[in-house]
């Protein structure tokens, strides 16, 4: 039986890799990667290609939206802004790229409508992440309505957020169970050769692997103890 097409927004990071592993079990994968001028753009693109190769996905689309870097407002795209090292649950960190997910989902929706994909998978996390406003459940519910209103009457596309309410530790555990290629992923906000181990994204990842009971397979620039 022919599998229905879905699009997975694959940044090359841990979360999107696990979501790719989830989606590939039941669907025909089409992978979308968006470069928006982030600091680790080259390394993330390599991770995307490596993961796509691991799953032997041929339907891929890479898009450059450099205007997000020109708009600025984020330490991921503005080298003059420091990357925060500590997570503050009461403050949206400077690594938030204004309305990024809406831009990414718009591209995915356009592609989905053309190729007949029925779902868009995204590895957003609401409860155990940086607290970005465009990673909330109500945002995705609203965008689903936008898709309905803004596409052809015979188009049926739904956003899927399978890890939205999971803890990062659970995502690592799920990735191991699904044999996702976590060794090919990249999460660091600052470095492209060895992960810094200090930025918020690295800290979330390190803690998750430690709590899950596994050593992280990617290299770090500083010594990491993996026993909790």
Image (cartoon, rainbow, N blue to C red):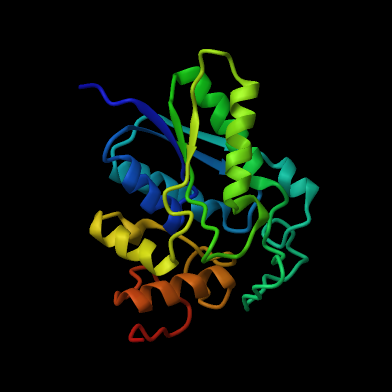
Where the C terminus falls, by quadrant? bottom left
Q: Say whether residue 39 is visible.
A: yes
Residue depicted at x 54% and y 68%:
201
* Quadrant in which the N terminus appears: top left
194 left or right of 21 in image: right
Residue drawn 41% across the image and 44% down it: 49
Question: Foreground: 172 or 198?
Answer: 172
Q: Nearer the viewer, residue 87 or 66?
A: 87
Q: In which quarter of the view is residue 56 placed?
A: top left
| Residue 36 relative to residue 228: left or right | right
Can residue 35 be seen here? The reply is: no
* Of the pair 37 and 3, the residue shown nearer to us: 3
Q: Position of residue 46 (x, y in %)?
A: 45, 50
Going by the image, does 85 lie left or right of 91?
left
Q: Residue furthest left?
A: 1
Q: Where is residue 94 in the image (x, y as percent from the top left)?
A: 72, 65
Q: Which of 127 and 52 is in front in this view?
A: 127
The picture places residue 203, in percent across and down from the top left corner, at 51, 75
**Number of numbered discs present?**
0
At x 32%, y 42%, the residue is 53
Task: Give coordinates of residue 88: x percent, y percent.
Answer: 66, 75
């Amino acid at each position: 039986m022919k599998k229905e097409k879905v699009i997975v927004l694959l940044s090359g990071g841990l979360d999107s890799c696990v979501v790719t592993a989830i989606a590939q079990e039941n669907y025909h994968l089409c992978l979308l990667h968006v470069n928006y001028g982030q600091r680790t753009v080259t390394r993330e693109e390599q991770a995307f290609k490596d993961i796509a190769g691991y799953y032997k996905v041929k339907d891929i689309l890479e898009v450059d939206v450099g205007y997000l870097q020109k708009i600025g407002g984020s330490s991921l795209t503005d080298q003059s802004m420091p990357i925060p090292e500590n997570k503050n649950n009461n403050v949206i960190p400077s690594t938030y790229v204004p309305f990024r997910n809406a831009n990414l989902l718009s591209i995915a929706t356009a592609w989905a409508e053309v190729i007949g994909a029925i779902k868009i998978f995204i590895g957003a996390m609401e409860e155990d992440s940086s607290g970005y406003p465009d990673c909330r459940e109500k945002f995705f519910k609203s965008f689903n309505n936008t898709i309905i209103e803004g596409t052809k009457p015979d188009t049926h596309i739904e956003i899927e957020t399978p890890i939205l309410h999971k803890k990062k530790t659970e995502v690592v555990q799920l990735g191991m169970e699904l044999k996702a290629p976590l060794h090919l992923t990249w999460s660091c906000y600052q470095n492209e050769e060895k992960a810094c181990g200090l930025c918020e994204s690295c800290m979330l990842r390190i803690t998750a692997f430690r709590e899950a009971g596994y050593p992280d397979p990617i290299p770090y620039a500083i010594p990491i103890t993996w026993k909790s």
